[in-house]
Structure formats: C-alpha cells, structure tokens
Image (cartoon, helix red, strand yellow):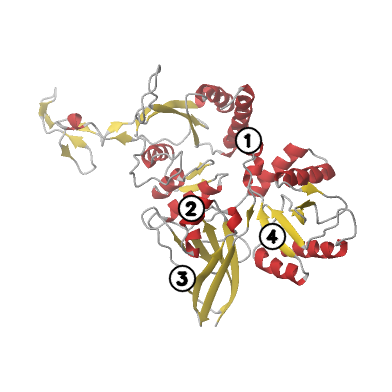
Amino acid sequence: MGGANDLGSYLKWIYETAVFLYELLSETGSLYVHLDSNVSHYVKALLDSVFGRDNLRNEVVWNKGYRGTARRRRFQQEHDVILFYAKSTDHTWNSTYVDYKDMSLARYNRVDEEGNRYARIKRRRTDGTVYYGRTYPKGKLQGDIIDVPIMAATSSERTGYPTQKPEALLERIIRASSNEGDLVLDCFCGSGTTPAVAEKLNRRWIACDLGRFAIHTSRKRLLGIDNIRPFIVQNLGKYERQVWQKAEFGEDAAFITRSYRKFILDLYHAEMVEGYTWLHGRKGGRMVHVGSVDSPVAVGEVRNIAIEFQQTLGTGKDAPRVAGVDILGWDFALDTNETAQQIASEAGLKVRFLRIPREVLEKKAVDQGDIRFFELAALSVAHQCARRELSIELTDFMIPPDDVPDDVAKAVRHWSDWIDYWAVDFNYRDDTFHNQWQSYRTRKDRTLLLRANHTYSKSGEYTVLIKAIDILGNDTTKTIQVKVL
C-alpha cells in the first residue's frame, strides 16, 4: 500500500463494504475479515463503528508458521489476524475441537461410542460408589489461536492462485459459525477455498470476485468436488461499470457519454472523431466504435455501424477511408462474432471485435499502462443428432495471434491446447447458462475431452449453448439449434 491517500481510499472502501455486508447479514450471521498486521488496527476501528464494539467476538490469530528466508532486524512474522464480528448476540455458534497432542492422549487411550476419549482408572466417589476414569471430549476446545500451517509447495490443494488459504482454516471457521443448509458468502473468493469447503460441509454458498482468473480457478476447483451440486456462474459486471462511469465522469448524460468514449479511445491509442452516431474514433486508418457499459454489443449494433460507414465513406474530413472498423465492447451477444462478421462482409466491411478489459476500472492499471484489448476468439463445432441422441465435437479454436504472449504461443502444439475448460447447456433458454456437461484440465490431468453426448427425454427444438474458456481466461460462446425427434 502506498501513501496516506491510498490508505484513506482503502479504508473508505472497507467502511462502505462493511456497511453493505452488515445489511446483508441475518441476525444469526457472522463476519470474518482476514487482514495482515499493516492495516488490522485501522480496520478494527471501522468495523467497531459498524457492528458495535460489543459484537467483536474475537481477534483470531491464524498461526500459519514461518516459511522463507530470515529477515534482518525484526522478528519473523508467523501469523495473520482474522477479525470475527457477530450481527447480534443470537449469532450461530458451534464449539469446535482440535486433536490433542500425542502426549495428552497417552493416558486417555479408550474411545466410547460417541468418539469421546477416556482413561479406565478406578476411582471412588465420596458416597462410596466406584467409577472408572475421566471422560475427555473428542478433542481440545478450539481457542482464538488457530494452528494451520500454510500449504506446502507439493500440496494437492494448490491451485496456483497467489493468496490461496488452506481448507483446514476455512473448515474451522465455517463449522463454528454456520449449520448445514446455511448460506455462506465470500465476496472476495480468490481461488475458491470458501465455496469449496462450504460445499463439502453441505452449506449453501455464494462466491464473488472481480478477477477472471479467480472465477475460472474457483469454477474448476468446485467441479473437481465429488457429487458437486449444480451451480451457475453469472456476470454482474455492468452494475460495477455503471457506478464507475458515474464516479469517473459525473451525472450529466451527454458529458458522461462523450468523456467515457474519449477515455476508452485514449487507452486504445485512437483519436476521437465527431459528427457520427456509431463511429467514434479512428486508429491507423480504421474507424473505431466504443460499446456502452450497459449492454453487450449485438448484431443490430453492427448492422447500424455498417450502414453509417457506407453512407459516410469518403465524404468529409473525419470520414472513413479504409473499409475496416474495430468494435470495442465489454461484452458481446451470443454469436456476434460469426453473425456480425457475415453482415459486415456483405457490406464490404472488415470488422474486428475487441474486448474492453476489466482492468480499465482500476486506476493503478490505467496509470501503469497495463491495458490490453483482446480480440475475440472463434470456436468451431460439429454436431449430429440421431433421434434423441446428440453428439457435439469441438473441431477448431482460433485466438488472434497478436493477443498471445510469445512464451505462451510457443508452448501450443494443437488448437485444443488453447482451451482450458468447456461446458455445454443442452437446453439454453436465453437466460442463465447451466453447466450440464463439462470437461476441464487439472494440474494432474491435462487431457481434455473434445466430444460431448446428451440424451433428450422428449422431442422438440432446442438451443444448445457451448462455452469455452481459453488459457488466458476469456469466454467464447457458440450456439447451435437442434431438432430432436
């Protein structure tokens, strides 16, 4: 973290987030906030003001153990802090236990039907009756110091995500503050440890993150759980973008639109042009269209771009002089790449579709120039339908070479190497995508199935949606229509 201004912005964001989470919590709910020693004291004061000081249940110490080289002139930091707040005095609480040390278990070497340990030592009560030994519970009552070492480099849990937490840590927290069937929220899920543990403990869960890599890592991790219940992945990005747009460019609609377009064009290294409805900039002789933050670029939008391009070709100072348009968008409607390419081709226009990256919303990334616009990939699919049996096969996947780092491109030997994960919704109803079948690579198994089969229970016409996620974390979709007899 940088200077005072950075800290102030961070704490403002933490406070607003805490207020929002407080409103979301049920009366029996709890909040756990994991921090390091640099900011824990600041955040604790803010959380006290939101939840009330009396509702701080514990300052939990996660004793994660020392790893790495020795540091000079300071003690080695072996712990992080987890602040545990409750919404009310009626919060859910389950006492949890940890195993005794081997030395403690030496005397209590018998176990009853409930798993409690006891020693068979003959003792006499004051009334003369005899009993045998003292019963110990299943383990030692968990204190406010949780001893869970950080994961070893060889751990089977490792996903490659830099801030991944051990499942054992989240298991103790989730068991303590929820019951089976309760809802667990992790609004910064990272590698997906919280939802993975919640799923294994039979809790309902919601997991959120801003990063594509985090969502992709979490999705694959969840799919690796035996008997995983169905879940959906939803993109709620437009709401974040709407808030960002107003905060960045103000409330006036006309000013917002113009300022927003200029901002995106500057990042794309294009110059702004005036006097058009659908053509907003120019770069290297090609015209540029900037899609809105509210909706995906659709086929109708491309049709309007093509019409305006034809009407204005070579008619003025800023008129297009090369038959090409770069279309920038946050999202793209299904099959826009293929259908819109055909419309543009009929108008004698060559179009490129490039995704506006989410990093545009991050001031630090913008200031550092870490913004890249990725061209959409193209997915080819073959299918056969015999009565109620559908077979789908991926036949090709193309990523524009300019978007791929050299070291990544050199490692690719076959077009399927670009695909990390793909899934199929065999009955897409123009709403939410449902994972009804999927194949994905894991650290241990890098193979990927290229064929999927499905049996329909009744005849009819179905829309099938295929979603492929490439090794860069980008989604590419393809829809096909099938008629089942």
Contact between marks 3 and 1 (CB within 8 A): the answer is no
Q: Position of residue 265 (x, y in %)?
A: 74, 47
| Residue at the disc numbered 1 | 364
Mark 4 is surrounded, within 10 Å at the Cα level, by few (under 14), some (14 to 19) or many (20 or more) other residues, namely some
Q: Which residue is at 50% across, 63% downward?
A: 423
Q: Position of residue 482 (x, y in %)?
A: 58, 76
Quarter of the image for the C terminus: give it: bottom right
Q: Disc 2 vs disc 1: which is toward the camera?
A: 1
| Residue at the disc numbered 2 | 219
Mark 3 is surrounded, within 10 Å at the Cα level, by few (under 14), some (14 to 19) or many (20 or more) other residues, namely some
The residue under label 4 is which amino acid type? Answer: Arg
Q: Disc 2 vs disc 4: which is toward the camera?
A: 4
Q: Which residue is at 60% across, 52% downward?
A: 235
Q: CA distance from mark 2 to mark 3?
A: 20 Å
Q: Is residue 166 above or below residue 378?
A: above
The residue under label 2 is which amino acid type? Answer: Arg
| Residue at the disc numbered 4 | 352
Which numbered disc flags the more N-terminal residue, 2 or 3? 2
SS class, disc 4? strand
SS class, disc 3? strand
Q: Disc 2 vs disc 3: which is toward the camera?
A: 3
Q: Is residue 135 above or below residue 296?
A: above
Q: Which residue is at 52% across, 65% downward?
A: 424
Q: Disc 3 vs disc 1: which is toward the camera?
A: 1
Q: CA distance from mark 3 to mark 4?
A: 29 Å
- Residue 439 lies in what quarter of the image? bottom left
Q: CA distance from mark 3 to mark 1?
A: 42 Å
Which numbered disc flags the more N-terminal residue, 3 or 1? 1
Q: CA distance from mark 4 to mark 1?
A: 28 Å
| Residue at the disc numbered 3 | 451
In the foreground, 115 or 336: 336
